[in-house]
Image: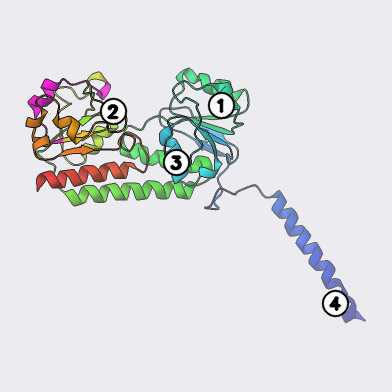
């Protein structure tokens, strides 16, 4: 009879064992964090130039009022967690755009989307964060990075904030590698060449001290907007037509093709511009406005355009 009793006890022991395992799993902390399956919550985020934020759990309803961050959110695999974005978040196309403004955010309008995380580019005196804190919603401020390295760090931070740390790290690594390869392939071809980067038809430009200017600097190009003081006007001076004509840049990059319908033909029709080296050598490059101004993975497309243009001009 002893062997028989032992056999009859087996099902009971199995049930008890499974019950104990289930209880242990329920007691274990929630460590799910996106497709990577890596834990990390609660997580403390320390963005550059902004207050630190602690997220107790993975956010599932994110509102992004930063076009650049919107792109990064989707790039790290957090797109399904994004419930609303601002009116300027035009990429990707499937982002849930609204009429909300990232420049003058309305706390009540934001709260209407019931977010558990709000991301903005700036928050003067922390007024938005204070208002949203009353509803228990954390605000993460991600300011415009000043260097490529700080951009990579921001990619990683977005990954950590959304429960996709591995994806954020991979995105930063791949973007950096792509840019470094493009620059290495060009070599010293850009040295001795000058350029003019146009933000709008009234000749606002960027200096070498800006984020955009640093990208050009990777190729050793000379910026005609620097003149004697690259830090003047916050790095965004308005040049005169005379200054541009006198500098006679080897390359002209148009970052006003979408906003202002500028292109190679419109530039050539400007008084005296048909005499510029860039125009005569067919070195007027039409850039997508947002790809050339946002700190997103699409910065690689911008770098590639510069690399191709430098290679052609040096040939």
Q: Most extreme residue toward the right, as rendered?
A: 1
Residue 22 lies, in percent from the top left, at: 74, 56
Q: Is residue 85 visible?
A: yes
Q: Nearer the viewer, residue 79 or 100?
A: 100
Q: Give the number of the disc on residue 7.
A: 4
Q: Is residue 157 visible?
A: no
Nearer to us of marks 1 and 4 is 1
Quarter holding the N terminus is bottom right
Nearer-the-camera pick, 204 or 1: 204
Disc with the residue nearer the chain's start (2 vs 1): 1
- Alpha carbon separation for disc pair 2 and 4: 83 Å
Residues at marks 1 and 3 touching, judged by CB atoms closer than 8 Å: no
Closer to the eye: label 2 or 1: 2
Marks 4 and 3, Cα distance to the nearest angstrom?
Answer: 63 Å
Q: Which residue is mark 1?
A: 110
Q: Which residue range is magenta in the image?
A: 234-251
Going by the image, does 46 lie left or right of 251?
Answer: right
Residue 223 figure quarter: top left
Reading the image, the residue beneath label 2 is 260
Disc 1 versus disc 3: nearer the observer: 3
Place of residue 275 in the rendered image (x, y in percent of width and height, measured from the top left): 6, 31
């Amino acid at each position: 009879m002893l062997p028989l009793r032992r056999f009859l006890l087996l099902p009971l022991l199995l049930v008890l064992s499974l019950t104990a395992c289930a209880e242990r799993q329920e007691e274990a902390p929630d460590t799910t964090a996106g497709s990577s399956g890596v834990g990390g919550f609660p997580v403390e985020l320390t963005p550059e130039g902004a207050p630190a934020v602690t997220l107790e759990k993975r956010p599932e309803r994110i509102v992004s009022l930063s076009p650049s961050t919107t792109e990064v959110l989707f790039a790290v695999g957090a797109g399904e967690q994004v419930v609303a974005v601002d009116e300027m978040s035009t990429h990707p196309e499937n982002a849930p755009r609204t009429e909300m403004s990232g420049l003058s955010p309305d706390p009540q309008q934001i709260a209407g989307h019931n977010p558990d995380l709000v991301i903005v580019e700036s928050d003067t005196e922390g007024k938005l964060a204070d208002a949203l804190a009353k509803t228990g919603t954390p605000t993460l401020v991600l300011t415009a990075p000043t260097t490529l390295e700080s951009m990579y760090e921001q990619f990683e931070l977005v990954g950590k904030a959304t429960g996709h740390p591995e994806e954020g790290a991979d995105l930063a690594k791949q973007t950096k590698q792509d840019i470094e390869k493009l620059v290495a392939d060009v070599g010293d071809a850009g040295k001795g060449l000058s350029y003019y980067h146009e933000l709008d038809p009234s000749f606002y430009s960027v200096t070498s001290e800006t984020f955009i200017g640093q990208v050009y600097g990777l190729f050793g190009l000379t910026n005609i907007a620097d003149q004697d003081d690259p830090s003047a006007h916050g790095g965004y001076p308005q040049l005169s037509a005379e200054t541009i004509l006198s500098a006679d840049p080897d390359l002209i990059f148009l970052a006003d093709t979408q906003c202002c319908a500028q292109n190679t033909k419109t530039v050539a029709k400007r008084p005296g511009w048909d005499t510029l080296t860039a125009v005569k050598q067919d070195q007027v490059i039409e850039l997508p406005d947002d790809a050339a101004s946002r700190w997103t993975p699409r910065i690689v497309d911008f770098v590639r355009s510069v690399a191709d243009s430098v290679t052609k001009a040096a040939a």
